[in-house]
Amino acid sequence: NGESGSEVTADFLLRTGRVVDMSRPKYPRHIEFCSEEARLKTFQNWPSYALLTPKELANAGLFFTGIDDQVKCFCCGGKLMNWEPSDRAWIEHSKHFPDCLFVLGRDVGNVALAS
Ligand SMILES: [Zn+2]
């Protein structure tokens, strides 16, 4: 017969309420940058005019997007750019993305650099 199993699966998921789970935002957004070391490596072409150090940005969960001085959070996916001399990575991150689970100190799989 031509009946496919996928319909049965979808119906099962609906009935068990798992569809609701799947609509939740997925964190971290960029699982490949959970590691601070992996984030640090993205700063190879970090522009010389950029005032913040890759170390500080990577520590705050941010990796370089390769565009201007734009960085992105591995957890919330939020973008930050146009850094000012007085900016601090953690403060800007929490100011613009207060709901970020990494900012809130949740366990989102961050792997800190061994120091
Ligand atoms: Zn974030």
Image (spheres, rainbow, N blue to C red):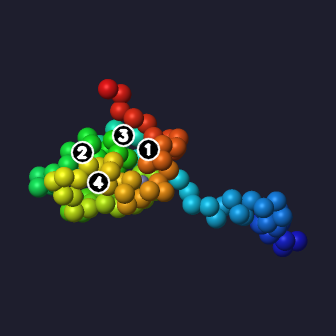
Label 2, secondary structure: give it.
Answer: helix
Q: Distance between the residues labelled 1 and 2?
A: 15 Å
Q: Which mark is residue 104?
A: none
Q: How crowded is mark 2: few (under 14 residues within 10 Å), some or many (20 or more)?
A: many
Pointers 4 and 2 in contact (C-beta within 8 Å): yes
Of the two numbered discs 4 and 2 on the same chain, state the one appearing first in sequence.
2
Q: Which residue is drawn at 16% across and 53% down?
A: 85
Q: Name the residue under label 3.
A: 36
Q: List the single residue furthest toward the left.
A: 49
Q: In this view, does 58 lie above or below 100?
A: above
Left or right for 3, reference 100: right
Give the x, y percent position of residue 45. 19, 52
Q: Mark 2 points at which residue?
A: 54
Q: In this view, does 67 lie above or below 32?
A: below
Q: Distance between the residues labelled 4 and 3?
A: 12 Å
Q: Which mark is residue 34?
A: 1
